Image: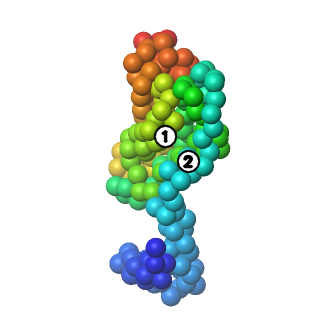
């Protein structure tokens, strides 16, 4: 990202909004916003496949592995406003596990791109499934979207929940329900 070019675009945006970019409070705003966008979209410069490939280990374990409550911060691609919440990832190993911190890193890389929550959820699940080849993978993201809270319908207490269930998490209601129970989510039908 060319932060000099982005700074100039932000300066022009301030003028279009009716502001004076030379007033004291806005003097360094274009540069700060450019640095902020560089950080918030740093996932474009990172390769999640490189992260995951360096942390796969052989195992005989075949019990469910879950990492809950991974913090997620992303920008909605439709309005460039933040959405934020929690991601839960579970899988059943089939000869391989991944270093636990790498699941958080994968989530972070995909979240630090312009996103929609549905795609983010699927990208995480698909990467784990494709590289670990587990019996199954489940990913659930619960997030609040500022594009819905501070504009448009202005619904402050709404939470969007998305899930991606692959392999045994998709094919077996018992596996899916165990995962949902362990992350503290109620399965459909009150289970």
Q: Which residue is mark 1?
A: 131
Measure the C-alpha gap from mark 1 to mark 2.
8 Å
Residue 182 makes an appearance in the image: no
Give the camera-side residue of 92 and 113: 92
Locate residue 107, reporting x and y percent.
53, 46
Q: Secondary structure at mark 1?
A: helix
Q: Is residue 9 visible?
A: yes
Q: Are the residues at dot 1 and dot 2 in contact (C-beta closer than 8 Å)?
A: yes
Q: Please identify the residue farthest to the bottom as the structure is shown.
A: 22
Q: Secondary structure at mark 2?
A: helix
Query: What residue appears at the point 41 percent right and 28 percent down from the top-left corner?
Result: 166
Q: Is residue 148 above or below residue 113?
A: above
**Applied colour scheme:** rainbow
Figure quadrant of residue 101:
top right
Q: Which badge, 1 or 2, is on the more N-terminal residue?
A: 2
Query: In the rendering, at what x and y percent does residue 189 appear?
Result: 42, 12
Out of 181 and 105, give the one closest to the viewer: 105
Q: Residue at x 63, y 38 (%)?
A: 57
**Residue at the image position 60 percent from the left and 49 percent from the top:** 54
Q: Nearer the viewer, residue 137 or 50?
A: 50
**Is the residue marked by circle 2 packed among few (<14), some (14-19), or many (20+) residues within 10 Å?**
few
- Residue at 64% over, 29% down: 59
> Residue 28 placed where, x, y %?
56, 81
Q: Which residue is mark 2?
A: 53
Q: Foreground: 157 or 103?
A: 103
């Amino acid at each position: 990202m060319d932060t000099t070019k982005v700074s100039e675009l932000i300066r022009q945006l301030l003028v279009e909004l009716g502001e004076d970019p030379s007033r004291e409070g806005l003097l360094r705003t274009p540069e700060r916003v450019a640095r902020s966008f560089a950080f918030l979209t740093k996932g474009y410069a990172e390769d999640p496949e490189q992260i995951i490939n360096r942390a796969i280990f052989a195992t005989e374990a075949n019990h469910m592995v879950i990492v809950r409550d991974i913090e997620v911060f992303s920008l909605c691609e439709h309005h460039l406003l933040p959405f934020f919440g929690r991601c839960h990832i579970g899988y059943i190993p089939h000869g391989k596990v991944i270093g636990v911190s790498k699941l958080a890193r994968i989530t972070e890389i995909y979240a630090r791109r312009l996103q929609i929550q549905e795609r983010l959820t699927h990208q995480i699940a698909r990467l784990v499934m494709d590289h670990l080849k587990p019996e199954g993978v489940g990913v659930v993201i619960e997030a609040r979207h500022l594009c819905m809270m501070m504009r448009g319908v202005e619904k402050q207490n709404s939470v969007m929940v998305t899930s991606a269930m692959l392999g045994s998490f998709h094919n077996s209601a018992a596996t899916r329900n165990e995962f949902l129970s362990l992350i503290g989510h109620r399965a459909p039908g009150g289970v």
